[in-house]
Image (cartoon, rainbow, N blue to C red):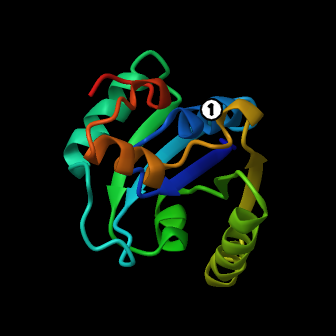
Amino acid sequence: MKRIAIFPGSFDPFTKGHQDIVMRSLGIFDEVVIAIGYNTAKQNRYFDIEFMVKKIEETFSKIPRVSVVVYNELTATLASKMGAKYLVRGLRNTTDFEYENSISQVNRHLNNELETVFLITSPELSSVSSTIIREVHRYGGDVQEFIPYKL
């Protein structure tokens, strides 16, 4: 049976930290689905979702085991529909762990076949966050070294 993992997030934008988690996940799973969700806590996206899908697909164009989907439902429901038994999440720090641990418990309650696998962010990428990149970009700063595609 294929080991399918979903890497869910808003990816606004998708960073080199996210790319690192995907690449490392390929050593564990047969297929990784980058699932761009609509986060109700984040009312407006900074980068258009279709633009981000295109950029992520370009980033992984030579890796057929990686795909991208957009979804607007519970992540646990998406996993069931896709036959995925795993969620992948990156952790930069203990604050990330506290937040992600709570979400993983709820996902497990909603779908008892779903395991969340946490990968610790590579040290050189631990300071990279979508929030910081958006702010730097918004005010005209160069973000190119933090993202794996050209803006």
In the image, taking residue 130 as reference, residue 105 lies left or right, namely right
Nearer to the camera, 98 or 112: 98
Which residue is nearer to you in this view: 1 or 149?
149
Is 131 located above or below residue 139 in the figure?
below
Q: Residue at x 76, y 35 (%)?
A: 123
Image coords of residue 113 (percent x, y): 71, 69
In the depicted structure, whether residue 29 falls above or below residue 70: above
Tally the marks.
1
x then y, percent, for residue 60: 44, 24
Location of residue 27 (image quadrant): top right
User: Which quarter of the figure is the N terminus placed in?
Assistant: top right
**Residue 11 shown left or right of residue 21 in the figure:** left
Q: Position of residue 2 (x, y in %)?
A: 65, 41
- Residue 27 higher or lower than 138, as above or below: above
> Dot 1, crowdedness within 10 Å: few (<14), some or many (≥20)?
some
Report the quarter where the C terminus lies.
top left
Give the left or right position of residue 43, taking residue 96 as reference. Answer: left
- In the image, 64 versus 19, the foreground residue is 19
Q: Which residue is mark 1?
A: 20
Give the residue drawn at x 31%, y 31%: 55
Amino acid type shown at disc 1? Asp
Q: Residue at x 68, y 42 (%)?
A: 126
Q: Secondary structure at mark 1?
A: helix
> Going 65% across and 35% down the picture, which residue do you hit?
125
Give the answer, above or below, for where 35 lies relative to 55.
below
